[in-house]
Image (cartoon, rainbow, N blue to C red):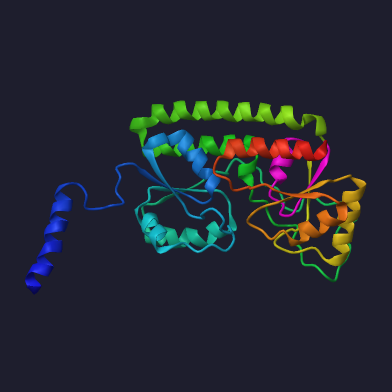
Amino acid sequence: MQKLVIAIPILMLVFMACSGQGDPWDTGRLSVLISVVPQQYFVERIAGDLAEVTVLIPPGASPTTYEISPSDMRRVNRADVWFTIGLQREVTWIPEFSSLNRRLKIVSTIEDVTRLPIGRYSIPGEHTDSGNHDHDHSGVDPHVWLSPELVSIQARAICANLIELDPVNSGIYAENLNLFLEEISDLQTRIHQSIDSFQGESFMVFHPAWGYFADEFSLIQVPIEISGSEPSPSEMAQLIDYGKNSSIKVVFVSPQFSETSAETIAGELEASVVFIDPLALNWAENLAMVSDQIASAME
């Protein structure tokens, strides 16, 4: 009886191996790792059905603290390429992933992207209080996926490396890239039509995720927090004064962060709190919606 129990799994493994089903993770497609959800949109636009995409940091998780699950580590072990995007969390994963999967190709998609300090936006007189805050204005802004212009750079890097890994399908990747670049161009036109009349205007956000978006479309992002720090009482007062003088009537918050400070400021300004998600999967639709929300808030 005991021999039978042992023999059945062995026979099943032999059958699975003979039928090509020995490895449930082997789909015959390129196995692609990405760090954040919007990158899935980019890879799938270029690769289509030729790649299986694994998102390392799932929806709703913090990009700064998320720990890889065991199932995802198995995917890392079998992956062909990992498209990084410049997150600090990636820095800690690179040696671990490289040790686990020595054939994994790690590709930075932002080599040709000029990255800027996350604290480049500041209201006049902000952060004059030296005793109650620990904000870091020197850190690099990681949110390079929220500018269509910067995404076009990332898309070219993704395409070039997919072609290198799978030259047989190079024509498909190249054609899909051109279609995606056209989609990006149409999106830029759509956003310009929505918000060009408000160039130079400010919009207030809790987490400063929208700096590259603001840069591209000539807006001013006014962040409530930087590097995870809540504003001090004096900074809150400065933000409220700025909001009143600028007639700000909407405070934008991300679903990944607490909205307590944003609600406090919004209450003082008699403004609304509106959620905009920097990590939405439908990237193009999301940016178009955000531009409409910002334009509506400025009208």
The image shows residue 40 at horizontal and vertical percentages of: 49, 43
Residue 189 located left or right of residue 16: right
| Residue 229 found in image quarter | bottom right
Q: Residue furthest bottom?
A: 2
Q: Looking at the picture, does residue 166 appear above or below residue 87?
A: above
Q: Which residues are magenta?
A: 200-218
Check the picture and name the quadrant holding the C terminus: top right
Give me the residue at 83% from left, 46% from top.
249
Give me the residue at 36% from left, 33% from top.
167
In the image, residue 242 lies in the stretch drawn in magenta: no
Viewer-side residue, 265 vs 210: 265
| Residue 63 found in image quarter | bottom right
Give me the residue at 7% from left, 71% from top.
3
Check the picture and name the quadrant holding the N terminus: bottom left
The image shows residue 99 at horizontal and vertical percentages of: 40, 61
Residue 2 located left or right of residue 77: left
On the question of residue 205 being in view, the answer is yes
Viewer-side residue, 235 vs 78: 235
In the image, residue 212 lies in the stretch drawn in magenta: yes
Residue 157 located left or right of residue 223: left
Q: Looking at the picture, does residue 65 appear above or below residue 112?
A: below
Instruction: Give the number of marks.
Output: 0
Residue 227 located left or right of residue 281: right
On the question of residue 124 being in view, the answer is no
The image shows residue 59 at horizontal and vertical percentages of: 54, 53
The image shows residue 207 at horizontal and vertical percentages of: 71, 54
